[in-house]
Image: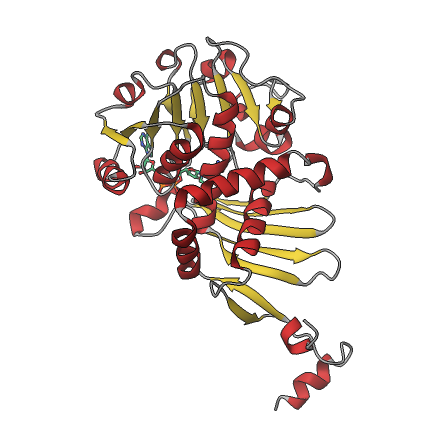
Amino acid sequence: MTDPSERALVPFVSVENMMRLVHETGLDEMLRRLAGAIEADFLRWESFDKTPRVASHSPLGVIELMPTADGTLYGFKYVNGHPKNTHTGLQTVTAFGLLASVETGYPVLLTEMTLLTALRTAAMSALAGKHLAPRGATTMAMIGNGAQSEFQCRAFGAICGIDTVRLWDKDRAATEKCARNLAGSGLTVLPCASAEEAIEGAQILTTCTADKQYATILSDNMVGPGVHINAIGGDCPGKTELAPGILDRASVFVEYPPQTRVEGEIQQMAEDHPVTELWQVLAGKAAGRKEAAQITLFDSVGFAIEDFSALKVVRDAIAGSDHYQLLDLLADPDDPRDLYGMLARAV
Ligand code: NAD
């Protein structure tokens, strides 16, 4: 684009346009694309600037900024986590994000990321599951049936071949909502009366609850040999879902250790508790599941590179479509040094 007034306009993807994009692409295809993009970026892990996310905690929740860059593009996500929000009709997690050119510093995309976070988190979980879950796994326990849950179930269906999900939430209405939403998805959906019932016969155990306190969603005696645990909800200091005994028995896989040691399940363990970085498994530099009886645990907290990958997927998907608006976000005067003159002439 040569016209300066056009060059300054930034594509913006609203929630409505994100929904159109997902429907036109197809949810399974979108999840697979996101998993593919995350995998490709994890394979060039060393080319990214990495830092634990910058968190601002309050008694009720957390607001976080998640930046990263690869030398060509810079991205960040703004995301909150407020478990009590649902009691007043608000969401636990909302987000938006931005992608910018490293060369000019100008943004190239601004987008809603509440839906995109649910999609990328599910894609990331399923990508980890593809490498860590027991071979031939067909059944997943889905504990915590809130906003993320259906996305998790669909991603494990599309990417890991799961055909049955066993649902449990302490709030029956959440389970009913999840079961209703998954009807017709091709998954067999079994609402359960307890966490113990939900994990019966499941080879993959996903925990995705929200509570700003140390919780025990899975106790040590609930986890038998050979399962894969996909722990999503423990993603903040003081907010965990697993009994420490499980962490002693499991092989723990993480995104970025400096962040996970503060936010993940392993915050309960010694600072040097052994973990494997997932990117190394994807790159063939470290082993994933070694034996059938092994308990594998993806201690997920969500890392900036996953959002960066998702932002690129959206940037590419909207090209040539009408699924975005152009925002007048940057001043970008004709004479770059005459910002004052631009303001004065606008009288
Ligand atoms: P949500 O509030 O919509 O749903 C959480 C559900 O957990 C609710 O239905 C609630 O009733 C249920 N729950 C709470 N305590 C429970 C218990 N003891 N037993 C059974 N169910 C229980 O939240 P959400 O948007 O689905 O997010 C879930 C969690 O995932 C949050 O903690 C969020 O911070 C986390 N999260 C993590 C990532 C990541 O990348 N790891 C990404 C997004 C969200």
Q: Residue at x 54, y 20 (%)?
A: 252
**Placement of 150 over or under 163, stated as above or below:** below
Looking at this rendering, what residue extends furthest in the right direction?
337
Which coloring applies here?
secondary structure
Q: Residue at x 40, y 48 (%)?
A: 26
Q: Image quadrant of residue 16?
A: bottom left
Q: Position of residue 233 (x, y in %)?
A: 43, 33
Is 124 left or right of 99, judged from the image as shown?
left
Q: Residue at x 41, y 41 (%)?
A: 28
Is 235 left or right of 16, judged from the image as shown?
right
Q: Position of residue 87 (x, y in %)?
A: 30, 47
Q: Nearer the viewer, residue 134 or 148?
A: 134
Q: Is any atom of residue 303 visible in this view?
A: no
Is 121 left or right of 199, judged from the image as shown?
right
Number of numbered discs overlaid on the protein picture: 0
Is 307 left or right of 82, judged from the image as shown?
right
Q: Is any atom of residue 181 visible in this view?
A: yes
Q: Position of residue 208 (x, y in %)?
A: 39, 33
**Placement of 257 over or under 59, stated as above or below:** above
Which quadrant would the N terminus be assigned to in this image?
bottom right
**Placement of 79 over or under 318, stated as above or below:** above
Q: Position of residue 27 (x, y in %)?
A: 40, 45
Q: Nearer the viewer, residue 221 or 83?
A: 221
